[in-house]
Image: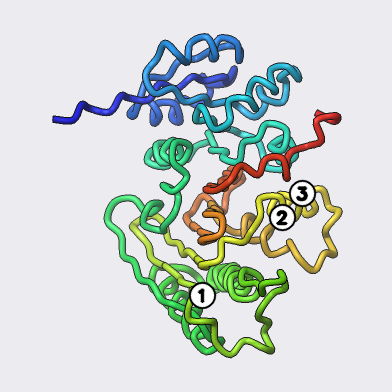
Amino acid sequence: MAGRAPQNTFLVLDPSAGEFGAFYEALAKSGTVIQLGSIEEAMALREAVDAPVLLLDTGFAKELLPSEVSTLVDQRGQLPIGLVTCQQTDDYLTELRRWGILQVAVKNEPLIPEEACHFIDCLRDPSSGFGLHAHLYHTMEMYNVSVSTMKEKNEAIESVINHFATSGFEVHELYDVRLILEEALNNALFHAFRTPTGEEKYSVSTLVQLDPKEKVRIEYGNNARMAGFSVTDSAGSLKVHTILDKLERQLNKEGLFDSSGRGLYLSRMLTTSFIINIEEGKRTQVLALFDKRRHTERPKPFILNFIGRDSFSEWRLDPDFD
């Protein structure tokens, strides 16, 4: 008979942890939470505990010395590492390039306890973040549809909007859902698929039908608290550095007039959580989740689940500027 999997041990570097009891109580349901004061303590303890997971507060991480950042970077791929925050994304986004971490959970209430545990699952295995069903906890209603033509795209959008309308979304909220869905579908249809020489294969004016090997699929649904949709392409061509570049330009106001990138920024601002999943060369998926928390000042999580070769050298800050 197989032995029981060891419980998580959360090695937490967060001086403000006491202010966010609900978040750490949620984590404690799936493991032991140990508060520590330094990277050195965490590294010394990691070999002595079962299933260690390192969690750093973004404010704490910004104060790390260069040598401590180097230690953190050296642990990439060897130890599950995630960030927790009570800050807005623009307070730490550029620092992600220094730390080499792309998954940031929000500590602020109101919380869904299952979200904290699912965040840990994604740190251990990024594939856990794929699929709308993984984010709609408890009893849910779900549908899916494939899109390969402009007609199917338009019909799919109306199906999703109708579902959200029957789930209690007001007219102005449906406008936001439509905007985000349209952006996600345009990215999947017109930017994901490439010719052998790297050019985009399709445009609004040229798309007749996707090649049979090319797939775009929408999932949509809801539970009692949350509604959402996902858009998945079968290319997996989106790059981490592209996402970071576009978001940084919007958040630091350099890209206010960019023709590209505004949709990504708005998608994050208009949702409770906007998650990007990439399995390099196989699929890219965006998930848009909506509940009442999106109308509050609660910070947005930053979740990019990536499966593939380690591309950190392409998106990290120049070490000379670390």
Q: Nearer the viewer, residue 251 or 83?
A: 83
Residue named by callout 1: 214
The local crowd at label 1, few if under 14, some if 14 to 19, many if 20 or more residues have their Cα within 10 Å, is some
Instruction: Please name the amino acid that badge 1 sits on.
Output: Glu
Q: Position of residue 5 (x, y in %)?
A: 28, 28
Instruction: Please name the amino acid that badge 3 sits on.
Output: Glu
Q: Position of residue 81 (x, y in %)?
A: 54, 30
The local crowd at label 2, few if under 14, some if 14 to 19, many if 20 or more residues have their Cα within 10 Å, is few
Which comes sooner in the sequence, label 2 or label 3? 2
Gap in angstroms between the C-alphas marked 3 and 1? 30 Å
Work out which residue is located at the far front of the displayed protein and give it: 196
Q: Which of the two discs, 2 and 1, sits closer to the camera?
A: 1
Quarter occupied by residue 184: bottom right
Q: Which mark is residue 242?
A: 2
Residue at image position (53%, 38%) is 105
Gap in angstroms between the C-alphas marked 2 and 3? 10 Å
Quarter occupied by residue 221: bottom left
Residue named by callout 3: 248
Q: Is residue 67 left or right of residue 217?
A: right
Q: Secondary structure at mark 1?
A: loop
Q: Position of residue 285 (x, y in %)?
A: 52, 60
**Quadrant where the N terminus is found in the figure:** top left
On screen, residue 19 above or below 45: below
Gap in angstroms between the C-alphas marked 2 and 1? 22 Å
Question: Is any atom of residue 274 visible in this view?
Answer: no
Q: Which of the two discs, 3 and 1, sits closer to the camera?
A: 1
Q: Which of the two discs, 2 and 3, sits closer to the camera?
A: 2
Q: Secondary structure at mark 3?
A: helix
On screen, residue 115 above or below 82: below
Q: Is residue 31 left or right of residue 254?
A: left
